[in-house]
């Protein structure tokens, strides 16, 4: 028995690609997420990191039941989200919220900011009067650093950072238990990124909300998350407590990602042995055999071509998938 809020078990997400002609014979499937498992506990932030196109967003959407997994399970407080009835799904929608990368395009341009922020209450708290909704909306606007008198303005009158504050207010107004932040600060200037990250951390401290923080930016994930899952081509490479990952990354891909962080700590003893990541990510339509990272891995051997590395526990709450981790950096 576990008290995890969210459990993801051997999750697969496939997308059909191409029409496949009249008989559908040429139809291909792209595996965006492959056999991913993890848990998130109450009040915790799990970071998901990897290069663009590694399946991070598909994973987030599958958790939110916005795409249907082709295998595995997503359990929310012990209940399989794909088997929920309409009433349970409505409750799930208020308990899990998402903040997207592009705040302006995720906000309805024809609604005022006040309407945007208060709208989820109409659906998820219909018992509230208009006056109570309005009061909650104003409190939420002020909590995210906006002013009550901004409620009658439209999204296009705000900066990118302010729009993201509006998105966060809209997500938080229903008091969710989990927020999926999908590249939520990637489109913002660095100073605004820091403000939004600090706002999310403050809200987490105040409310106990859990977060799944998805980003290609390892420095931002390091700031936000207590544990980090490193993904490559839809697969889990390493799942580790944050500090352990940075102090002692054992997977060659994690090491390459950390080496690419501009402000990587020069005092880290591993820094001399970090290698630059070269080459392009292979097409997910024809992933490499064996270890999917082998075409870019400086440590690849014939064994990496022939068989898929299994996920192994290398310490408490620390797992990875590499044939050679014991001899490489342990
Ligand atoms: S299994 Fe082989 S190719 Fe894959 S990360 Fe480990 S050493 Fe590199």
Image: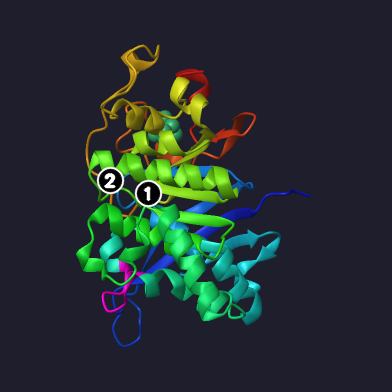
Say which mark, if any, is on residue 281: 2
**Where residue 258 appears, x then y in whole percent?**
35, 28
Q: Is residue 99 visible?
A: no
Residues 125 and 17: in front is 125
Residue at 34% from the left image edge and 42% from the top image edge: 195
Q: Is residue 131 above or below residue 299?
A: below
Q: Earlier along the polypeptide chain: callout 1 or callout 2?
A: 1
User: Under tag 2, what secondary structure?
Assistant: loop
Q: CA distance from mark 1 to mark 2?
A: 7 Å
Q: Is residue 166 above or below residue 205?
A: below
In the image, taking residue 254 as reference, residue 296 lies left or right, namely left
Question: In the rendered image, which residue does mark 1 sit on?
Answer: 233
Q: Is residue 253 above or below residue 169?
A: above
Q: Label 1: few (<14), some or many (≥20) within 10 Å? A: many
Say which mark, if any, is on residue 91: none
In the image, taking residue 14 as reference, residue 44 lies left or right, namely right
In the image, taking residue 270 as reference, residue 229 lies left or right, namely right
**Where residue 172 appears, x then y in whole percent?**
49, 59
Secondary structure mostly seen in magenta is loop
User: Under tag 1, what secondary structure?
Assistant: loop
């Amino acid at each position: 028995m576990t008290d995890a809020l969210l459990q993801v078990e051997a999750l697969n997400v496939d997308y059909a690609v191409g029409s496949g002609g009249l008989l559908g014979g040429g139809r291909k499937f792209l595996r965006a997420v492959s056999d991913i498992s993890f848990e998130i506990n109450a009040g915790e932030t799990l970071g998901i990191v990897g290069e663009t196109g590694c399946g991070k967003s598909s994973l987030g959407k599958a958790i939110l039941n916005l795409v249907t997994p082709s295998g595995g399970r997503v359990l929310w407080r012990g209940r399989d989200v794909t088997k929920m009835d309409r009433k349970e799904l409505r409750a799930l929608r208020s308990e899990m919220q998402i903040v997207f990368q592009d705040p302006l395009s995720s906000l309805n341009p024809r609604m005022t900011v006040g309407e945007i922020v208060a709208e989820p209450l109409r659906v998820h708290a219909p018992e509230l009067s208009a006056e109570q909704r309005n009061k909650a909306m104003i409190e939420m606007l002020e909590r995210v650093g906006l002013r009550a008198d901004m409620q009658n303005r439209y999204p296009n009158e705000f900066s990118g950072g302010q729009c993201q504050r509006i998105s966060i207010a809209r997500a938080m107004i229903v008091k969710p238990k989990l927020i999926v932040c999908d590249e939520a600060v990637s489109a913002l200037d660095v100073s605004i990124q820091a403000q939004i990250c600090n706002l999310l951390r403050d809200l987490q401290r105040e409310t106990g909300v859990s977060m799944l923080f998805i980003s290609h930016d390892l420095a931002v994930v390091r700031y936000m998350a207590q544990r980090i899952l490193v993904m490559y081509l839809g697969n889990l490479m390493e799942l580790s407590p944050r500090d352990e990952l940075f102090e002692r990354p054992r997977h060659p891909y994690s090491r390459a990602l950390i080496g690419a962080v501009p402000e990587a700590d020069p005092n880290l003893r591993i820094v001399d042995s970090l290698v630059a990541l070269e080459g392009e990510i292979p097409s997910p339509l024809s992933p490499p055999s064996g270890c999917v990272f082998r075409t870019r891995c400086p440590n690849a051997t014939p064994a990496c071509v022939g068989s898929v590395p299994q996920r192994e526990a290398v310490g408490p709450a620390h797992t990875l998938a590499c044939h050679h981790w014991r001899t490489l950096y342990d």
